Structures are given as structure tokens and as C-alpha cells.
Image (cartoon, helix red, strand yellow):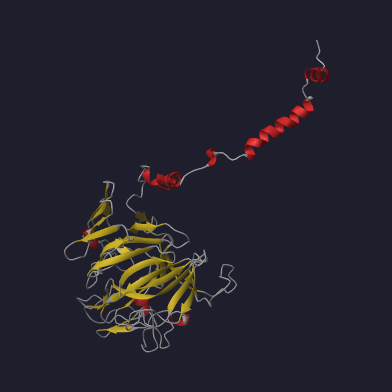
């Protein structure tokens, strides 16, 4: 039998289907309009979500010890972040360490960084200069704005001339995450990446960091001349105006050899092929790696981090919102760091030449045995005339380092200078004087 819906509904006293549909839509909407406790949460629950990642045991990964190797040059460095305090803004409040695998013993004294053989891992501008002049300024003090005098002057040590081209290899920027970048003279005012305000800009890097100039350094005490104001691609501003020199490798060359760069005051040196020494023995030039640290880093929203210095010592890192890291020292090296409630401690050998451990607030620690790497030096290649015969320094041996992770894992690293070939590199034949019989080869 076919039912008549209209008749059935009327006889039963029930509204027709059209009203049923309207009523059901209304009833379904009511629970959405009424509040329920099922939607609420608590602060304890939300905080649990914040710390959840710290409770998860994860894989340490292939770079658990902070190692980074340049596969083109073979250079290696280690970076570790000890303290990082989360907060607003683009500028981190962090204390990190950086170890560069390089020869540190060919200075008249081993360089002492804030963590002994480890550098402090914060942005800086740096260059290598003759110790007797440092990163000197032209007479007007404009080391930043006078781009025509970027190369440092010729200096004399024990009567032997060393030009800027002998001992200097450019101005550089280092920033965590951005690595090393050379400062290049900025000549393209139409560059679309140039900041819309500020300037004038005198320098730029390959990653489009733009540099204008500060009128003076903040140091005082004999440090003078301009500083640098950098703006990175995110709009963050870096005030580089605190200068600190560190000792680096000595530079040697045969007595009587003219500088690589001719100067008007030294006639007869214009021919760069004339590299024949005129007397036995070597002249040695002491050099410094001069760093210009920041005193303030500010993002485009106005959040900033200030760095407080006392001489070569970083005393405090403090953010505009109150986060801070305070450091204490044992002579020239960092002994401890605190964020106000937790403390990190650093231990060194008796002479404070090498960092041995970095102990975290929970008692776990990084352990280091890296003293052997001090003796690692580049392999010497000697070209005997134009025959192309290269003589290796066979005295080179492998050098080892051991790093213990706070988890207990141990990493062992072995380094040895290795010859790297380059294709399509022209060979230059230069005569050298045989000091035994006066002949050249």
C-alpha cells in the first residue's frame, strides 16, 4: 500500500515533513550556541605542552657534537649552544661556543678566547692585521667610510717591509647560522635589497648584509675610529663598536724579499715577479686577529639584546624584556654563566689554555680532549722550479680530538692536512735564491 504522508500526518497530529525539517535544524543548532565545560583547558595542561618536547628522547643526529665541515676546503669547526632563553623578537638571548680547527701554536703566545681555545659564538666583524698597528684608521679615523683605503699600510719589522697584501686578507663578518662572509665595497646604489632607510652604505656581503658607519667605537682606552652598523636581510640592526684583538699566526718571509704590493716609497718593487730574497734568514711579523663585537642587536620590531663588555670580557647579555645571562671569569676565561636561576660551569687545564668540560645545571656535562689539535698545521708544498714537482711535508701526522656528549656518547675525530687538487689553475714559476751557493732555482 502506498502511504499518503499528508493524510497520515494530519490524522496523527504531527506537523508535516516541512516543519519537521525546520525543527530539526533548530534543535541541532542549539548545542553549538550553549557553552560546555568540554571546551575548557587549564594552565597546567598548556604548560605540559610547552615542556613536552623536552621529555621526548630523540635521536642525537649526525652532528650531535656540533661539527660542521666544509667539503670544498676540508675546514672543520664545532659549535655548541649552552644557554638559550626563549622569548619574543628575532634576536636570541643565547650563549654559545665555537671551536675552529686551525693551527694555534704558531703565535708567540697561544690566543686566549673567552673559553680558552673556544671562541664565544656571537656575531662580529674581524680582520687580520700587523700587531704594531692593529686595525688602524686613516688620519681621519674613518676605517669604515673610506673604502679607497681598505688595505692596511706597509709596516716594517726589524727593517723588513710587509705590505697590507702580505699580512691581510680582507674584512669579514661572522654570524651564527650565516657563517663567514667577506665585506665587499658597495657600489650598486640601485640594489633592490638595499634597506629603505639609513645609510649611506659602504659595504655589503654575499648574503645582502648592508653596512653603514658609526662615528666612534665604544671602547675608549686607546681604541678610536669608526665602528660598523650592519642590517641583515631580516631588518635586524647590529651595532659593531667594541674592539678586541686576539693573537694569531706569525707571518714569516725571507729577508730582503720585497712586499707583494708596491708602494710609492719603495721604488723597484713594482714587478711582482721579483721575489728573490737578498740575504739569508727570515723576517717574522707578529699579527693580531682584530674582532669588533656588538654592543646591541635590535630587530625591526624594537626588541633588542644589549652586550655589556669590560675590556675583552663579555659580562652580560640582556634583552629588552628582562631575560639575561651573566658571566663570571677566572682570570681571562669564563668560569660560569647564569640565567638567574640556573648555572653553567666551565673547567680548564691548569694553565687555562684548553677547555676540559662544560657542566650543565642538571649535572650532565660536555667533555673535551682537544689539546692535540693545537699542533695541526697546513701541509707545506714546495714547487721546485717549473717541473711541477711538489714536495710534501712528510713530518705531518694525524691529530686527534675526543668529545663526550652530555648524554654519555663519545665522538672521536681525526684530522690530517690533505692535498687538494684544483683544475685549470695556472702555475707561476718564481725564482728563489739558494742561500747555500747564491744560485737560483
Taking the view exactly as shown, the residue that stands out farthest to the top is 1
Looking at the picture, how far across and down is residue 323, in whole percent?
Answer: 39, 62
Name the one closer to the observer, 28 or 155. Answer: 28
Name the one closer to the observer, 56 or 116. Answer: 56
Which residue does the image show at 74% across and 29% down from the upper left?
21
Residue 375 as seen in the image, left or right of residue 88: left
Looking at the picture, how far across and down is residue 264, in whole percent?
Answer: 40, 88
* Residue 148 visible in the current orientation: yes
How many numbered callouts? 0
* Residue 74 visible in the current orientation: no
Quadrant the N terminus occupies: top right
Residue 91 as seen in the image, left or right of residue 358: right
Looking at the picture, how far across and down is residue 78, in whole percent?
Answer: 33, 57
| Above or below 32: residue 310 | below
Which residue does the image show at 26% across and 73% down from the upper left?
250
Residue 185 as seen in the image, left or right of residue 336: right
Looking at the picture, how far across and down is residue 29, in whole percent?
Answer: 67, 36
Name the one closer to the observer, 94 or 207. Answer: 94
Taking the view exactly as shown, the residue that stands out farthest to the front is 13
Residue 181 location, quadrant: bottom left
Residue 218 location, quadrant: bottom left
Which residue does the image show at 44% across and 68% down from the upper left?
297
Quadrant the C terminus occupies: bottom left
Name the one closer to the observer, 234 or 322. Answer: 322
Amino acid at each position: 500500500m502506498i502511504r499518503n504522508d499528508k493524510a497520515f500526518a494530519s490524522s496523527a497530529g504531527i506537523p508535516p515533513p516541512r516543519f519537521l525539517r525546520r525543527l530539526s535544524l533548530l534543535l541541532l543548532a542549539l548545542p553549538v550556541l550553549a557553552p560546555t565545560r568540554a571546551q575548557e583547558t587549564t594552565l597546567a595542561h598548556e604548560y605540559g605542552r610547552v615542556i613536552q618536547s623536552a621529555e621526548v628522547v630523540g635521536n642525537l643526529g649526525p652532528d650531535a657534537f656540533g661539527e660542521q665541515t666544509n667539503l670544498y676546503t676540508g675546514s672543520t669547526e664545532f659549535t655548541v649552544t649552552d644557554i638559550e632563553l626563549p622569548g619574543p623578537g628575532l634576536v636570541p638571548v643565547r650563549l654559545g661556543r665555537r671551536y675552529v680547527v686551525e693551527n694555534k701554536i704558531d703565535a708567540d703566545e697561544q690566543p686566549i678566547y673567552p673559553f680558552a681555545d673556544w671562541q664565544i659564538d656571537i656575531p662580529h666583524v674581524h680582520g687580520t692585521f700587523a700587531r704594531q698597528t692593529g686595525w688602524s684608521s686613516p688620519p681621519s679615523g674613518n676605517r669604515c667610510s673610506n673604502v679607497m683605503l681598505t688595505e692596511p699600510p706597509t709596516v716594517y719589522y726589524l727593517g723588513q717591509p710587509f705590505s697590507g697584501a702580505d699580512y691581510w686578507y680582507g674584512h669579514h663578518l661572522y654570524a651564527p647560522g650565516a657563517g663567514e662572509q667577506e665585506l665587499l665595497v658597495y657600489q650598486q646604489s640601485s640594489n633592490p635589497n638595499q634597506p629603505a632607510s639609513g645609510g649611506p652604505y659602504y659595504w655589503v656581503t654575499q648574503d645582502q648584509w648592508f653596512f653603514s658607519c658609526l662615528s666612534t667605537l665604544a671602547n675608549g682606552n686607546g681604541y678610536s675610529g669608526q665602528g660598523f652598523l650592519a642590517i641583515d636581510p631580516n631588518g635586524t640592526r647590529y651595532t659593531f663598536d667594541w674592539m678586541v684583538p686576539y693573537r694569531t699566526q706569525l707571518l714569516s718571509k725571507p729577508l730582503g724579499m720585497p712586499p707583494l704590493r708596491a708602494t710609492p716609497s719603495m721604488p723597484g718593487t713594482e714587478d711582482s715577479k721579483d721575489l728573490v730574497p737578498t740575504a739569508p734568514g727570515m723576517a717574522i711579523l707578529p699579527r693580531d686577529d682584530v674582532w669588533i663585537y656588538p654592543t646591541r642587536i635590535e630587530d625591526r620590531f624594537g626588541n633588542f639584546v644589549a652586550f655589556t663588555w669590560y675590556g675583552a670580557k663579555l659580562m652580560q647579555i640582556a634583552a629588552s624584556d628582562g631575560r639575561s645571562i651573566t658571566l663570571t671569569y677566572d682570570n681571562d676565561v669564563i668560569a660560569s654563566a647564569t640565567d638567574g636561576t640556573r648555572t653553567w660551569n666551565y673547567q680548564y687545564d691548569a694553565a687555562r689554555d684548553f677547555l676540559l668540560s662544560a657542566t650543565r645545571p642538571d649535572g650532565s656535562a660536555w667533555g673535551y680532549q682537544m689539546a692535540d689539535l693545537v699542533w695541526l698545521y697546513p701541509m707545506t708544498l714546495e714547487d721546485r722550479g717549473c717541473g711541477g714537482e711538489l714536495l710534501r711535508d712528510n713530518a705531518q701526522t694525524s691529530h686527534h680530538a675526543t668529545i663526550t656528549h652530555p648524554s654519555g656518547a663519545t665522538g672521536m675525530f681525526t684530522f690530517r692536512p690533505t692535498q687538494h687538487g684544483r683544475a685549470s689553475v695556472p702555475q707561476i714559476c718564481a725564482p728563489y735564491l739558494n742561500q747555500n751557493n747564491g744560485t737560483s732555482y
